[in-house]
Image (tube, helix red, strand yellow):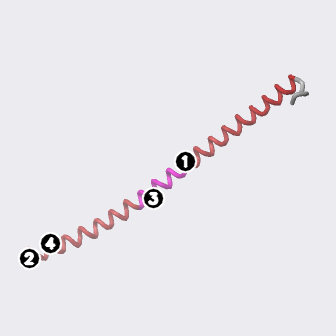
């Protein structure tokens, strides 16, 4: 680099900076997409867990009502 012309050095530096800026934008976009997809997967996972818990609650409620109904009769 010591024997490069100043204009060539500036041009090379600008080119590297431009490519770095473009790569930075692309990486940022990919990271945002990855975060969004993980968020969707987590929401789906939580919704599935809620469905499981609701089903379990209904089963326990039904069993409790059957047990409580037999005691008072």
Mark positioned earlier in the residue sequence (4 or 3):
3
Would you place residue 29 above or below residue 54 in this image? above
Q: CA distance from mark 2 to mark 1?
A: 57 Å
Q: Which residues are magenta?
A: 37-48
* Residue positioned most to the front: 2
Q: Is residue 25 magenta?
A: no
Which numbered dot is residue 68? 4
Circles 4 and 1: CB atoms closer than 8 Å:
no
Query: How many other residues sit within 10 Å of disc 4, few (<14), some (14-19) or many (≥20)?
Result: few
Task: Check if mark 3's residue and mark 2's residue have beta carbons within 8 Å.
Answer: no
Task: Pick the residue in front: 22 or 20.
Answer: 20
Q: Give x and y (percent) for residue 29.
A: 62, 42
Picture layout, residue 40 above or below residue 15: below
Q: Earlier in the sequence, mark 2 or mark 1?
A: 1
Mark-to-mark CA distance, 4 and 1: 48 Å
Q: Can you tell which quarter of the image residue 49 is in? A: bottom left
How many other residues sit within 10 Å of disc 3, few (<14), some (14-19) or many (≥20)? few
Q: Which label's residue is closer to the chain start, 2 or 4?
A: 4
Distance from label 3 to label 1 (Cα)?
Answer: 15 Å
Task: In the rendered view, tell whether residue 55 sits above or below residue 17.
Answer: below
Residue bearing mark 1? 35
Q: Would residue 35 appear left or right of 9 to someone viewing this image? A: left
Q: Secondary structure at mark 2?
A: loop
- Secondary element at image label 1: helix
Q: Nearer the viewer, mark 2 or mark 4?
A: 4
Q: Nearer the viewer, residue 31 or 37?
A: 31
Q: Which mark is residue 73?
A: 2
């Amino acid at each position: 680099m010591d024997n490069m012309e100043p204009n060539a050095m500036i041009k090379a530096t600008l080119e590297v900076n431009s490519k770095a800026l473009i790569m930075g934008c692309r990486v940022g976009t990919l990271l945002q997409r990855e975060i969004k997809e993980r968020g969707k997967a987590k929401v789906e996972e939580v919704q599935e867990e809620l469905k499981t818990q609701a089903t379990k609650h209904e089963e326990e409620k039904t069993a409790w009502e059957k047990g409580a109904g037999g005691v008072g009769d």
